[in-house]
Image (spheres, rainbow, N blue to C red):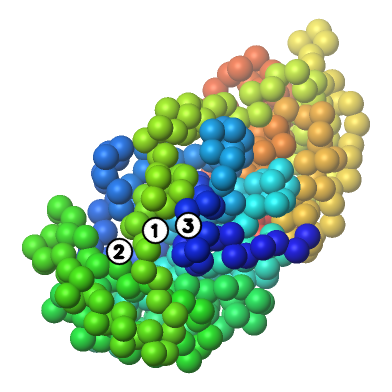
Amino acid sequence: MIKDTTRHPCFNKESAGSCGRVHLPVAPKCNIQCNYCNRKYDCVNESRPGVTSGVLKPFQAAEYMHKVLEKEPRITVAGIAGPGDPFANPAETLETMRLINAEHPGLLYCLSTNGMGILPYLDDIAEIGVSHVTITISAVDPAIGARIYAWVKDGNVVYRGEQGAALLLERQIAAIKGLKERGVTVKINSIVIPGVNDHHIVEVARVCAGLGADIQNMIPLKPTADTPFAHLPEPGSETVLPLRKEAGKVIAQMTHCRRCRADAVGLLGDDQSAALCGALQACSKLKPLEANASKPYVAVATREGMLVNQHLGEAKSFQIWGEAEGGIYRLIGERPAPDAGCGPKRWTSLAATLHDCRAVLCAAVGETPRLMLEEHGIAAHVVDGFIQDSLRAVFTGGDLRLFKGRRAGIGGACTGTGGGCG
């Protein structure tokens, strides 16, 4: 499907009065800490990034999207902009985009990120059809970046000072190049911070333009309580307009930004996040499809048929168990697992294989397969011990946490990318 990318109101000012956007708040975690950011606030009257009235899981976001389009049919863009960073929450971000794309293929899809964690997912972004990505870059000099970022987290390692700023900049540069190679429109958000980077912001424009970025959005600092920059003044038009004029010589400038919330919805000049706050909060309380007790079976990853002792991604097949007869649960049969190494499609295939199972029991599971199975109504439970004991807990509503043993922690270190590790 060829989409009209001019319908993105943030990238095209002329469409801002007729085309709207919705931000789906499915990404609570962040991988950097900026000295102007405080995500602790939840106020319907406050409009700034990092603020939301609730956090949604992917299946909840899909339901919320239906409600948004019923209320505001002028929505043309579905985006994820936090309240943390989409790629500090990659499984939730990509699954949400896949669900929305499957149900609303005519929409445009966009993401707003700091760029730190996006590189492993560039091909996924292109495959899903994300057409617009915003990267927040406020410095292209690590010495200046060190004053803006308190820390940068790469996996489990935290970097501070110029080392952290340099690493972030390296990832951001690579992200712009990779996105442009895949035909994605790239916007650069640059926070104008008085006395910190206001003298440097035009250089940010030059560097990003040289990398192929399409447009820059200079956003005046919004001083926020309980942050290191809370004492700084908010720069006015006398500061920002000359910077935009100078930077506009090398890259197009966005001049109609509203500093949107992480749950913004509606036209840029007519935000409906307060009106839809109740719908968002109601969707955030929806129960996952795993509660569907009408599914008669439970799948088990086991080596010998007595213990739950296989990682989801290692299992070559799954035993299928049914309700008890005479106190003993019945083995219905065995089903082969999809081949390893085919990415997220592997877990979609597994969900189809286990379509009549309410749950799958395994010794460990990665976050991506867990989320994708959940979206198809299959709960992935990490347990350790005898199959019959765990089945009793599933079928009778018992506490499966009692069956988590030493192997239950394995899944926490797994990314679940589909390469065979689950």
- The kind of residue on which mark 1 rests is Cys
Q: Position of residue 388 (x, y in %)?
A: 72, 24
Residue at screen point 17% across, 75% down: 238
Along the line of sight, the residue nearer the viewer: 237 or 79: 237
Residue that numbered label 3 is attached to: 16
| Helix, strand or loop for disc 2 | strand
| Helix, strand or loop for disc 1 | loop
Distance from Cα at disc 1 to Cα at disc 3 = 29 Å
Residue at screen point 18% across, 76% down: 239
Choose top left, top right, bottom left or bottom right for residue 162. bottom left
Along the line of sight, the residue nearer the viewer: 301 or 59: 59
Tell which circle, 3 or 2, labels the residue nearer the N-terminal end. Answer: 3
Instruction: Give the label on residue 33, or none.
Output: 2
- The kind of residue on which mark 3 rests is Ala
| Quarter containing the N terminus | bottom right
Q: Residues within 10 Å of mark 3 (few under 14, many from 20)?
A: some
Choose top left, top right, bottom left or bottom right for residue 333. top right
Residue at screen point 47% across, 83% down: 173
Query: Do residues under tags 1 and 2 come within 8 Å of each other at their CB atoms?
Result: yes
Residue at screen point 69% across, 46% down: 104
Q: Can residue 331 be seen in this snapshot?
A: yes
| Quarter containing the C terminus | bottom right
Task: Determine the residue located farthest toward the top in the rendered image.
Answer: 326
Dot in front, 1 or 3:
3
| Helix, strand or loop for disc 3 | loop
**72 with respect to 331 (left or right):** left
Instruction: Give the label on residue 191, or none.
Output: none
Distance from Cα at disc 1 to Cα at disc 2 = 7 Å
Tell which circle, 1 or 3, labels the residue nearer the N-terminal end. Answer: 3
Residue that numbered label 1 is attached to: 30
Distance from Cα at disc 3 to Cα at disc 2 = 31 Å
Q: Position of residue 80 (x, y in %)?
A: 50, 54
